[in-house]
């Protein structure tokens, strides 16, 4: 009897542990969320910043944005990984997405910490509201997964969109650059003029061209400046332009003729890429046709005949 009572008490402790383990995780997540909100509040309303604000007498929008970045950056050390390779990869993606500020990495990991805390909070609410549901575990895992990997997915989408915008601006920029160089302008002046002309239609690529012009004026060699442009944008289509400009600068060839040759080659590559996409369309359309179109076709074509056949067989 004593052993049975001991085993019964152990079972009760096990059930108590299982039921309250998740509640303990919820408590920890809530405490972390409260601490994060406290850090934000203290970062915005610290006595030193209130004194500086009263001395300055105004609070402009850039100052508020800087305060927000500073407050969020204070939470970044919790999430920043120790691996230098991972940090460099995220920093490269942030640069390719258009975030060139020095605190972009800290801001990203701070947002990631906030999304994780929100995921924990939503997971706790889901656990409390959907106890006994067969889909509860799947929903909680999906919420945690979105909170953990959601910022990375959004960043990858921003990088892809910016690459598409810059890739779409390259043909227009090359045509304008050929016209400007053949009309007598120097390469740097032509590049500056093209950047000014593209500011309305392609602002992202125009800003990158302005950066290249500034680097060349500061003394950076032209191939090096364009190589850094490829690293900042992630558009590998510009690698051929870097190689051709480097070769022209070494052998003393005509930059205008080099640009014209590269423009023709780039136009041929775009035509071949479009033909490749068009050639893949029949194969890609095969599966939707088999799964969705053909069943409907057979139902419409053979349905009346089958109904008549079944009536005759009765």
Image (cartoon, rainbow, N blue to C red):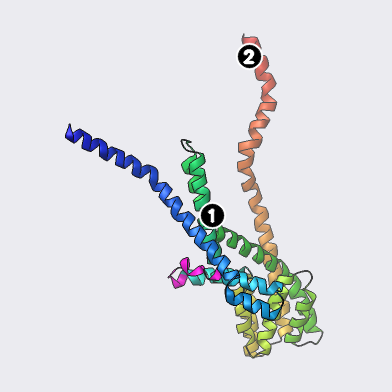
Magenta stretch?
A: 72-85
* Residue 30: image location, x then y, percent: 49, 54
Q: Residue at x 68, y 31 (%)?
A: 297
Q: Residue at x 52, y 62 (%)?
A: 36
Mark 1 or mark 2, which has the lower sequence index? 1
The picture quadrant where one finds residue 309 is: top right
* Residue 305: image location, x then y, percent: 68, 19
Q: Pick the quarter of the image with the N terminus.
A: top left
Q: Residue at x 49, y 70 (%)?
A: 87
Residue in the foreground of this view, choosing between 249 and 115: 115
Q: Pick the quarter of the image with the C terminus.
A: top right
104 sits to left or right of 253? left
* SS of the residue under disc 2: helix
What crowding class fits label 2: few (fewer than 14 Cα within 10 Å), some (14-19), or many (20 or more)?
Answer: few
Residue in the foreground of this view, choosing between 49 and 251: 49
Residue in the foreground of this view, choosing between 311 and 216: 216
218 sits to left or right of 108? right
The residue under label 2 is: 310
Q: Which mark is residue 107?
A: none
Residue in the foreground of this view, choosing between 52 and 114: 52
| CB within 8 Å, label 1 to label 2 | no
Q: Give the residue furthest to the left.
A: 2
Q: Nearer the viewer, mark 1 or mark 2?
A: 1
The magenta stretch spans residue 79: yes
* SS of the residue under disc 1: helix
The residue under label 1 is: 118
287 above or below 155? above
* Residue 216: image location, x then y, percent: 67, 87
The magenta stretch spans residue 209: no
């Amino acid at each position: 009897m004593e052993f049975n009572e001991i085993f019964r008490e152990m079972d009760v402790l096990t059930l108590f542990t299982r039921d309250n383990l998740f509640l303990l995780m919820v408590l920890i997540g809530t405490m972390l969320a409260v601490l994060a909100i406290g850090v934000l509040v203290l970062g915005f309303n610290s006595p030193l910043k209130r004194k500086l604000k009263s001395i300055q007498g105004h609070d402009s929008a850039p100052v508020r944005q800087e305060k927000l970045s500073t407050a969020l950056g204070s939470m970044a050390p919790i999430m920043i990984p120790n691996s230098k390779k991972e940090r460099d990869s995220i920093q490269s993606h942030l640069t390719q997405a258009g975030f060139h500020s020095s605190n972009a990495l800290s801001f990203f990991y701070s947002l990631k910490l906030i999304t994780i805390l929100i995921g924990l909070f939503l997971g706790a609410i889901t656990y409390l509201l959907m106890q006994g549901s067969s889909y509860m575990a799947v929903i909680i895992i999906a919420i945690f997964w979105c909170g953990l990997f959601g910022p990375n997915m959004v960043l990858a989408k921003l990088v892809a969109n910016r690459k598409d915008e810059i890739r779409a601006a390259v043909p227009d920029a090359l045509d304008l650059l050929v016209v400007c160089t053949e009309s007598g302008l120097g390469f740097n002046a032509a590049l500056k003029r093209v950047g000014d002309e593209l500011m309305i239609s392609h602002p992202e690529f125009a800003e990158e061209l302005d950066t290249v012009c500034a680097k060349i004026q500061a003394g950076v060699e032209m191939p090096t400046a364009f190589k850094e442009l490829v690293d900042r944008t992630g558009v590998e289509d510009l690698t051929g332009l870097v190689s051709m400009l480097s070769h022209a600068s070494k052998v003393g060839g005509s930059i205008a003729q080099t640009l014209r040759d590269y423009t023709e080659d780039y136009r041929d590559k775009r035509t071949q890429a479009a033909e490749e996409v068009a050639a893949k369309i029949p194969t890609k359309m095969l599966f939707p046709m088999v799964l969705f179109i053909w069943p409907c076709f057979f139902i419409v074509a053979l349905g009346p005949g089958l109904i008549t056949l079944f009536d005759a067989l009765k």
